[in-house]
Image: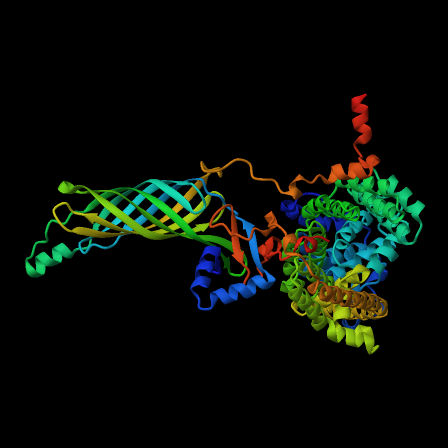
Amino acid sequence: MTYLKRAPRHRAWLTLLLAPLLVAAEPAPEAGDDTPPPPAAEAPSARRRAAPPEVFEDGLGHYYADDFESAAAEMFDYLSTNEDTVENYEWAEYFLGVSLKELGFTHAAAEYLYNVAKNRTRPEILPEALEQIEVLMQGPHDEELLFRRLLVDSEFGYLPGRVADFVNYKKAMADLLDGRIEWAERLFDELPDDSPFKPEAIYTVGVQRLKGNRMTDAVKKFRTALNHPLANRDTRNKSRLALARILYEKERYASARKLYDQVEVPELTTAEASLYLEKAWTSYFLKDYRRTMGILYALEAPSYRTYFAPERFLLRALVYRSLCHYIPAKREIRRFNFRYDRTLANIRARIDLRDDEVLRTAALSRGALQGVADFRRLLSDEADRIDTIGGSWVEVGLDEHLRRLYALKAEQVDLHLAAELTKATRAVAEELVDFEEQMYLLDYEVGLEIYKRLRKENARRPSKADNLDIPYGGDQVYYAFDDEFWNDELAHYDFFVENRCFDEGGDE
Amino acid sequence: MRRAALPLCLAGVLLASGAARADEDELEAGRVIAVQDRPFRLAHEFTVSAGVLPMDAFYTGLSLGGSYTLHLTDLVSWEAIAFHYSASVDKGLSDQLLERWSVEDTDEPVIQYLVSSHAIFTPFYGKLTLLNNSIVNVSTYLSVGGGAIRYQGEGGFRPHFSIGPGLRFLFGQVVSARLDARNMISPDFLGGADYILHVTASVSFNFGSSRPTDLGDDELEEADLADPFGDLDELYPLSDPERGKKREGEQ
């Protein structure tokens, strides 16, 4: 028997009509089911008598009428007041999970769908539950619960095409992360070509080849992933980024920049800031100093202010030095010191690095910790939203249950974060100290160059880059920057600056 | 308006006291300018207008018309032909004069339609935020031109010279909305001249984006000439996933 609907939503009335019949077709509850269930963990349910099957039917009706709030309350009522051997228990967990997902309580949804998929007492729901879990895993989620404990540690038996590919892909990722490279690659290879996970698998193998310094293989994999007809935007972008970085390393800066320009990342995110920084370095090595400075100015926008990138000061100072603007170059070095003075003092004072806001924020916005931090934020947001739903949830105690569930998970994530932060903040601190040294070195070099003697006849000739004229019209419009950042302009800043170098100074 | 294009800023800066000093300081460490492609490029614009001729004591003209504008550059365009038909609505002043003071009004001519042609200069271009949510591009322009006015009855034709500001909201490459206020002087051959104000609200439809003044191909920048995959082929000759297929094709 299945309660899942494949027909379009406009035929929900048909399911509503059929739902009681479907329930009736199930074996009738035994007499013993009428006896009150044993005391449940939740206080409210302990005071309530067992919800009859009609509550489940009502919940089903509400679910198919898109009234997920009522559906969640009724399914929870049914679950919390009955034993797990009661008829349709797994179905109730499934519908509760999906209803919570539709209402935006993704972590709670994951907990219930995890139960359905892990217990597998109803194999017919398993593919559906895994499909829902796949969607949940696209956003911040409990990696340990869904990835490790469910997908990696479970044997699901037969699964239909796409769901099987999803599970195999995740299992291969786990093998890869745990160092079982051959196992991982075998699983990746077994994915059929028409699987939507294939391009991502090819990309992942490419990264593996890159780690092993098998460059030709790596590039081939990235190009294959990029051109794969089923590659999604994310995979295409990651492949482009990987190829751009390879070209950058090989000093093919113009080509690298062209690929960087094709990478699309969500606006105003850390990923975008990181991309800007890479573009800035590429432009710097192309000697396109105006563009370099334009990109670096974009990184000053409030949206990127918390992005940890001390090298932006270094790069700006390098550009000014390259254009023989020595005083502004020194000013950038002072700006670096001013910006990170307190953090550097904290590092030298050997305080607990997790207490430094700059280091903490930087550590939480990179690597695996970023995912954990995002999940922690999601827990807070969703927990806050429980209070906005009252009525039927309060009656059955679902609100209180969710509050406890979220509080427990938040506590667990906080402990994990605290443990990982020590290592991560230390890495950031070491990076900052390295940059400080580079800034001191640059300060010294700029000091030397100020007093370098040059002959007048070596004065450089103006180049195209020196053209600082602004046309009155044309296909482009020039907005003078007045300390007001407009999101649509961030990628278009140009830095109008005079090159004051003599021949020797203009080049690296 | 949040910001107008640079010419406006430059004019303001030049007028301000101590501007030269400020410029010098700015050049010291450079200045940041956002250089963006204009999102919309007008070429052949057809406009449908509804307007009003409010400046007559005896009647108000309600006009309906249309025009064609050829955009030569983003700064200069030519409204080649504009036609506005005016339906006059009596304000009742003639009746009042007659009833209260038994005075009959002079036989003032009433506008029947206007034909005109204008040069349009668009020095101001900028953008506005709409409820902090989306951006609307706006331009402000000045129209200068003239044409002929046909008066009802024996009024016949009279020339007119016209000047006035306008405002354009660009909603896309095709559709924009315009608001024009044109001040017209229409000399009377018998002596004197009439002042006419014509205010119109219009919807414009633009067709095409290439202009007669467009020059040849733009110069390609170095980045445009770059060939990332050519470079990858050169660096890693066996990395092209299509290589095997290409060879098979050649054989």
Image coordinates for residue A487, horizontal then vertical, percent: 59, 57
Q: Is residue A260 left or right of residue B239?
A: left
Q: What colour scheme does the image use?
A: rainbow
To which quarter of the image does residue B223 belong? top right
Image coordinates for residue A29, horizontal then vertical, percent: 82, 56
Residue lying farthest left?
Answer: B102
Q: How many marks?
A: 0
**Is residue B121 shown above or below A216?**
below
Q: Is residue A225 visible?
A: yes
**Is residue A311 shown above or below B238?**
below
Choose between A473 and B84: the one closer to the eye. A473
Q: Can residue A291 be seen in this view?
A: no
Choose between B162 and A422: the one closer to the eye. B162
Q: Is residue B104 left or right of residue A288?
A: left
Residue lying farthest top?
Answer: B251
Q: What residue is shown at x 18% (from left), y 51% (from top)?
A: B193
Choose between A249 and A60: the one closer to the eye. A249
Q: What residue is shown at x 24% (from left), y 52% (from top)?
A: B196
Q: What residue is shown at x 84% (from left), y 43% (from top)?
A: A218
Q: What residue is shown at x 87% (from left), y 49% (from top)?
A: A211
Image coordinates for residue A350, horizontal then vertical, percent: 84, 77
The C terminus of chain B - image quarter: top right
Image coordinates for residue B117, horizontal then vertical, percent: 31, 42
To which quarter of the image does residue A361 belong? bottom right
